[in-house]
Amino acid sequence: MNGAETLVRTLLENGVDTCFANPGTSEMHFVAALDENPDMRCILCLFEGGTTGAADGYARMTGNVAATLLHLAPGFGNAFANLHNARKGGSGIVNIVGDHASYHLKYESPLKGNVEGISAAVSHWTRTCQNARSVALDGAAAITAARSGGGQIATLILPADTAWEPGGDVAVCAPVPEPRLPGADRIAAAAEVLRNPGACLMVGRDALYGRLRRIAGQIAHETGCRLMSDTAVPRLERGGGSVQIEPLVYHIDGKLGQLEQASHIVLCGLHRPVAFFAYPGKPSLPEPADCQVHSLCDPGMDIAGTLYALAQTLGISDDAPADIVPLELPALPEGTVTLEKAGAAIAALMPENSIIVNESVTASFPLLSATRTARPHDLLATTGGAIGQCLPCATGAAVACPDRQVIALSGDGSAMYTLQSLWTMAREHLNVVVIVIANRGYQILHGELKAVGVDSVGRNAHRMFDLVDPDLDWVALAQGHGVPAARATSMEAFNNALTKGLDTNGPFLIELVVPAD
């Protein structure tokens, strides 16, 4: 086997069987090795940001790492934004980045770039293969790194000659290091402060769904504290039957209002919440000045063990109660399109166990408020705030969960960043209903301009914020990528389109035209 073949076999041997790819010349021997191993599912993405966004969605829904295949420094640069989102969300990803043959790097070829430098800015672990015989060992180390710390970005740089020269043996990953657990004194102190009036338990990562979410809810019920999450989370269990949780809102004024009465905040599985941006005359931290913030468990620590220990300290039994969200389905709305009505239609029609991937930005609050009491589902958000995450993340989630309906909610501006993902959805026959909120602009920037104290909007600001002259035609864009589509300008049309999309075997796009305010 050559180096590339040992790497592919090592990935498969260690449970990495999905590769989101955008290869180039330097990766041809790796492509040939993939071709010899049909157990590896290879999914072509037409833009590198699509590969990393899809790997992020896949990791969020499986808990396992996926591989990406990228081409040199420029390809990694194109992939950077969604790696930033994945890093913020704790997704484990193994990037395989082809580079020039080691002896070719002394020449200033057109595509030569500092792969290690750009990788180090977003990766937790980076290594360049030094020779073909070490490639498999390096690959195994990358997988271990990606699975460590609750999920990390690992980047393996593969010079072309280390891929084509004779390699070594297939390697087995070292065990993932055991995550750290807080000391018993810190857990006891957290249990005590959670009983104080105004106390909040704020959870993240794995505590936002499944059994750990239930334990967090039992702790909140027992102590009387508020159970909360940060704004943009990697995966949140929602809908009727889920444990009540209060996410922080986006705007700093809203955050300040939510935490106005907070006396203590205990953090488990997340970093200290902060405003997305600085605003003149407003604080960066949303809690009151006299509120005590206790960092009990960082995201890379043992979140499960911490919650179990906290529950045990509080004497909570396995069958203890928690506050539950009721199942309340709205009637199908009619008439003029509003975001509130659109959210109600989605809540009424989406099937149980759907996965909502949300990047609808200014439309998020009304859409997600309406779906809070819908049938049980998961919500995936743009964890790092870098837009262009929705369509690739939905692609990866659909690959990970082919038996579940994926619904992608995106603003029209955001969707333009990675619309190539529509083609991948079509090629892979993925069950994704994409709903593009066509409000004809980067509406959030109009709000941000006001938030920093600028009241008037002139010609140049409108030219930079508004997506008009010409209007984007999302039906044509979808169809050009092989995805059937419909435009909805009334609620009746949207209800019909959403019903059709949910019944379609494969992707379907709805352009929801939202009237201007």
Image (cartoon, grey):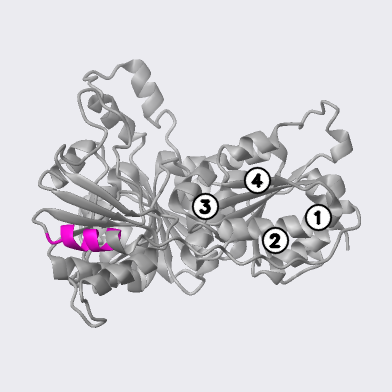
Is 312 rendered above or below residue 68?
A: below
Is residue 62 among what the camera can see? yes
Label 1 close to label 3 by CB (< 8 Å): no
Reading the image, the residue beneath label 3 is 392
- In front: mark 3 or mark 4? 4
Q: Which residue is mark 1?
A: 134
For the residue pair 481 and 111, the one nearer the viewer reads as 111
Residue type of the residue flagged with mark 1: Ser
Q: CA distance from mark 3 to mark 2?
A: 26 Å
Q: Callout 4, which amino acid? A: Thr
Magenta range: 186-195
Instruction: Tell me the crowding category of disc 1: few under 14, some 14 to 19, or many 20 or more residues within 10 angstroms, Cα based.
Output: some
Q: Which residue is mark 2?
A: 140
Q: Earlier in the sequence, mark 1 or mark 2?
A: 1
Sequence-wise, which precedes: disc 1 or disc 3?
1
Specify the farthest residue to the bottom. 319
**Label 4 – label 2 distance at C-alpha:** 13 Å
The CA distance from mark 3 to mark 4 is 24 Å
Distance of label 4 from label 1 (alpha carbons): 15 Å
Q: Residues within 10 Å of mark 3 (few under 14, many from 20)?
A: many
Residue 430 in view here: no
Q: Amino acid at mark 3?
A: Pro
Q: Earlier in the sequence, mark 3 or mark 2?
A: 2
The structure residue drawn at horizontal position 56% and vertical position 61%, both measured from the top left corner, is 147
Q: Please tell me which of labels 4 and 1 falls first in the chain.
A: 4
Q: Earlier in the sequence, mark 3 or mark 4?
A: 4
| 321, above or below 472, in the image | below
- Residue indicated by mark 4: 126
Mark 4, Cα crowd under 10 Å, few <14 / some 14-19 / many 20+, is: many
- Side of 183 where 335 appears, left or right: left
